[in-house]
Structure formats: C-alpha cells, structure tokens
Amino acid sequence: MSEEQNRNKVGTAGTAGTAGPQPLRGKVALVAGATRGAGRAIAVGLGALGATVYATGRTTREHVSEVGRTTETIEETGELVTAAGGEGVAVRVDHLEPDQVRDLIARVERDHGRLDVLVNDVWGGEHLVEFGKKMWEIDLDRGLRMLELGVKTHIVTSHCALPLLLRTGGGLLVEITDGTAEANKPYREMFFYDLTKNAPIRMAFGLSHELKDAGATALSLTPGFLRSEQMLDHFGVTEENWRDAIAKERHFALSETPALVGRAVAALAADPDKARWNGASLYSGQVAQEYGFTDTDGTVPDSWPYFQRVMAGEDPGDPESYRLRP
C-alpha cells in the first residue's frame, strides 16, 4: 500500500497523523474484530493517540472469513494504525476458539505485560439477518450462528483477557453493539438479532459491577447508521457520493463514518475520569458532544434520539435536523 493510499484510508477510518497529543502512548489495546467498519476505525482512533493496538479478525491477505469480503484485511488495519501514529499489530484470531484467544493474550502479556483497553467488536453476522420472519421461521442454525458470532465471541474474549486488563488498574472494556439500552426497548424486529445486540449491553452492565473494585470501567457503545464499507457497497455508493443513497433510504441522511465511533473509543480511553461511565450505555454522537469532537465532515450526527422515534413509530422529522454543526 502506498503512503497516499494509507493516508486516504486513515482519513475515513479515524484520526490521521501524529501532530496532536498522544495520551495513550505506552498503553496497549486489543480490538477484537478490527478487520473493517467500526472495529478498524476504533483501532485507528486508538493508534492516533499513540496506543499499541492488537487488531484481530479472521480475514487476512491469505484467508477470507465467512463474511466473504476480500477487500479489507487485518494486516491493512494494522498498517493504518501505524500510519495514524500508533503501533499496529495484526493477529488472525477466531474468537470462538478459546485456545486462539488464550494464545493471543499470552502474546500480549509476553510482549508488554499489560492490557489497558479491550474492545469487543466481533460480529460479522450481517449475512444471517432476516428481518420480517418469526423466530420459528428462521433456520435454527443461522439463528444460533448469530448468537455465536455476536455474543459467544465477546464472552470468550473477555474471559481470557480481563485478568490481564485488571493487572495495572484503570483499564477500559468497551462492548460494541447496535443500539443503546434505552433505544432498544422496542423489539428489534428479529428474535436472534434482538438477543445478539442486547446481550453486549447487559454484559457491559454486569461486568461494570465485577470490575469496579479493581478500578476498571466497562461500558457499551453503539455507532449510529454506520457508513461502513459493507453498507456503502450495499447501496452502490462510495464515501465521496454517499448522499446518492438517500433517495433509496431516507434515514441514511443521518449516517456517520466509522471514524466517529473510533474517535469515541479513543476519547473514552484517554479520559482519566472514565470511571464515571462505568455501566453506561452510550452512543457515538453522545460521546462526541461530551468530548468535543466531530465526524470527518465537521458535524455530529445525533443519531439515536432520531432512531428511537423511528422505532417507536413516530415521525422523527428531517434527519438533517439531528446533524449538529458545532
């Protein structure tokens, strides 16, 4: 990859360059599920603040996961982290395999003796989602696979990694999901999807109690309508002409780049008072307003108040009116 390509990709994934402060220099992070989308941007955002970031996933330049995408790899994510100012370490890991996760944590411990940030972003189940079907109409293996990919992977990773995270004190666990505890009160229209996306919220809440005495913080975080690589492809647009997709999907007008959630995790990780968020269920636009950063276009999509009204069957009004311009 050329330097120019690296710069362009970093610009959409997170904060590029090393010109700013690097409060996470010397800190070690693991982003589980960092191949693309939110996970990649989170890895880059942490790297931009100086962290060493272990970026894991199943898709490499030699191996493609069941997601079936060959255009994003963990090696590329590692390179983007380094280009942003951190140290990117790409490791192929299937987070359903405890032995692979244990080996990863042993490597982090051997290399650094610490883990400061753990981000559980493993998912890769979009191809299994079937809205509009009753629970018993969905193939059971497909439904259970969603729970494996989006819930079991998070449990396995936390179980293996938390002892190291707790060793130095002040660690941060972030569960990435879709929706907040408040926004997900309405049914998410598919039994297995509803379970898969609510479980990380509850996991963060439960672990917030178990980590508190050790001085660590656990929280859940959701992006809004994410303009990930897959979503752009779904609508047949690019980041340059993404607004062309609004004609197909009105709500897409409030979409956000992965960089916003990446910057959110980085801001939380760098906050010396992060413990105030212990047990919280947050969204990217909320964190942006709290810490004073924006998406790549200089705006803050305040997405979840909008989508709460949509899911409640109310008229939310113009999506653009929820895009804040600081």
Image: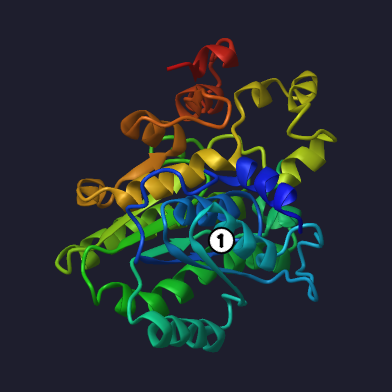
* 66 versus 72 height, above or below: below
Residue 195 appears in the picture as rendered: no
**Identity of the amino acid at label 1?**
Thr
* 282 versus 46 height, above or below: above
| Colour mapping | rainbow
Q: Residue at x 76, y 29 (%)?
A: 240
Residue 251 coordinates in the image, percent (x, y): 65, 23
Residue 227 coordinates in the image, percent (x, y): 66, 37
Which quadrant is home to the C terminus?
top left
Q: Residue at x 51, y 23 (%)?
A: 299
Query: 3 left or right of 161?
Result: right
Considering depth in this image, is 223 or 129 the residue closer to the camera? 223
Residue 230 coordinates in the image, percent (x, y): 74, 47
Which residue in the rendered view is the most extreme toward the right? Answer: 236
Residue 115 coordinates in the image, percent (x, y): 35, 72
Residue that badge 1 annotates? 82
Considering depth in this image, is 125 or 34 the residue closer to the camera? 34
Residue 127 appears in the picture as rendered: yes
Query: 317 left or right of 280?
Result: right
Q: Classify mark 1: helix, strand or loop.
A: helix
* 296 versus 253 height, above or below: below
Q: Residue at x 69, y 62 (%)?
A: 76
Query: 92 left or right of 276?
Result: right
Query: 66 left or right of 145?
Result: right
Label 1: few (<14), some (14–19) or many (≥20) C-alpha neighbours in 10 Å: many
Q: Residue at x 58, y 16 (%)?
A: 319
Considering depth in this image, is 205 or 289 the residue closer to the camera? 289
Which quadrant is home to the N terminus?
bottom right
Residue 64 position by quadrant = bottom right
